[in-house]
Image (spheres, rainbow, N blue to C red):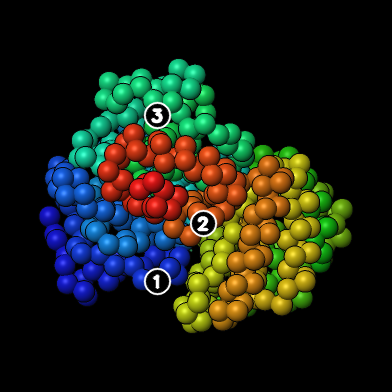
Amino acid sequence: MIIKSDKDTISPYLTDQSGLNGSYCERVFVPENYSEVSDVLKYAFQNSLPVTVSGSGTGVTGGRLPFGGIVISLEKLNKIISFDNEYLVVQAGVPLSEIHSFLKKRNRIYPPDSTEWSASIGGNIATNASGSRTFKYGPTRKYVKELKIALPNGDILDIPRGEFVAKGSWFETPFLPPFEIANYKMPDIKNAAGYYSQKNMDLIDLFIGSEGTLSVILEAKLKTLYFNGQLLSFFVFFDDYSQVLDFVAKARKQNLLSIEFFDENSLILVRKNFSQIPKNKKAAVFFEEEILDKTPDAVEKAIGKWSEILSKFNIDDKYIWAAVEEDKEEEFKKIRHEVPVQVNEIVKLRKIPKVGTDIAVPEENFNEMFSYYLQLFASEKIDYLIFGHIGDCHLHANILPKNIEEMKTAKEIYLKLVKKAILLNGTVSAEHGIGKLKHQFLKEMYGEDGLKEMVRIKKIFDEKGILNRDNIFPKEYLDK
Ligand SMILES: Cc1cc2nc3c(=O)[nH]c(=O)nc-3n(C[C@H](O)[C@H](O)[C@H](O)COP(=O)(O)OP(=O)(O)OC[C@H]3O[C@@H](n4cnc5c(N)ncnc54)[C@H](O)[C@@H]3O)c2cc1C
């Protein structure tokens, strides 16, 4: 096991994509097998030492950033262990890029296609990550069949789906005293805010999305799907937002893989590196359809269907881009990925974190939420852009303050958006998690009692409160 303790070797573990500053730790442990992870945890447990778990550091909520104690990095647990044509067993540190390229050669996919492929699968499971194709396939949770985890006291457990299931609200397992699930109601939409809680739930779902606060994920068995590789993708540019909403309502009924949105400011940003993006367009929608039948006729038929749907919107042909070839589809995906990349460049330049929302609402309330975004930003003079998973009624507003004063305004806007989303039965985090930056919003969503329920659950697994302190709820709650 590598142990890092000097400033230079530790510093890469003190950043992620959140822009949160001030992170520090004593040492970074880089175990090369599961028993080394267990040994480090036992040592930390005996000495009541805070432990922060580190994946690839692409998180945007400060989840992997330590504030004292030690770090366990999963980077050396990076092996693909086995594949039986349906289930893929991987260690937690394997990056998504490797999983995708391994499966592509075998005509299979791991469906949750979280945009950032340098992220580790452990990080994706810890945050219940989603991607654009979650619109069709659902989030990470749906594809995790089994986990190998290490508890904060160093015990290693296998948690297969279906093995430990709550009876109503109660769990009885061979390794824990009986306990009741958290007592709050989760919204019935894409959601990554706080611990999972449902009557008759599977124990594995408690660990998925728990942001490393209950266990260190060591290994996962993932469900993969057959994919014939034939996609039809479109980029369509619109002149106004009401057209976009009309189109998206129609597109949602078409069994698409993904439907993604870009506002005018996102298009301006992306044009820096993709000069082909047309000027003076108000918005764009990117969508993908899997063509199950691989014959040329099937592709023609699908193109015909979309021509007909789009003909009602009077869009000039040059603003409708279609792709069936793989390299063109790749380019579309690069354009999609370019938005958060460019945002991060601005953040680095300004040295002031962005304020990024991760709100989703039920479909019936989406248009109201969308109008609220527009109305709110129209009344504020601040740099912002809105983009993301419009198919899932889940948009990211990224607010880019230039100074401390604007940061205050950005946070006020965020809080207003959060309050509106909660009124509309939405979630404050649909995919990024709460981390260390969004405690306040989680409290808005679940109230003080909800947070206390999460603390109760945490203490069942982590009685000393050493693991990933300050993720999901403020660490002070652990000492109350
Ligand atoms: C350009 C860009 C695009 C992005 N797009 C998306 C997107 O489409 N969808 C999405 O959901 N997210 C997206 N993200 C956010 C990020 O990629 C995800 O949150 C990802 O799941 C983080 O994985 P990571 O390995 O980088 O984890 P880290 O950032 O290292 O950690 C994230 C959290 O997971 C915990 N953790 C990591 N590994 C483990 C483990 N083995 N056991 C227990 N806990 C662990 C950490 O402690 C931390 O709390 C994007 C980020 C960027 C920069």
Three-letter amino acid code at the position of disc 3: Leu
Check residue 219 in the rendering and tell me which mark sits there, or answer none.
none
According to the picture, the residue beneath numbered tag 3 turns out to be 203
> Which mark sits nearer the N-terminus, 1 or 3?
1
According to the picture, the residue beneath numbered tag 1 turns out to be 21
Q: Nearer the viewer, residue 405 or 164?
A: 405
Q: Residues within 10 Å of mark 3 (few under 14, many from 20)?
A: many
According to the picture, the residue beneath numbered tag 2 turns out to be 438
> Which mark sits nearer the N-terminus, 2 or 3?
3
Q: Examine the rendered structure and indicate whether residue 447 appears above or below residue 239.
A: above
Three-letter amino acid code at the position of disc 1: Asn
Callout in the foreground (1, 3): 1
Q: Is residue 108 left or right of residue 336?
A: left
> Which mark sits nearer the N-terminus, 1 or 2?
1
**Helix, strand or loop at disc 1?**
loop
| Residue 378 rendering spot, x and y as whole percentages | 77, 70
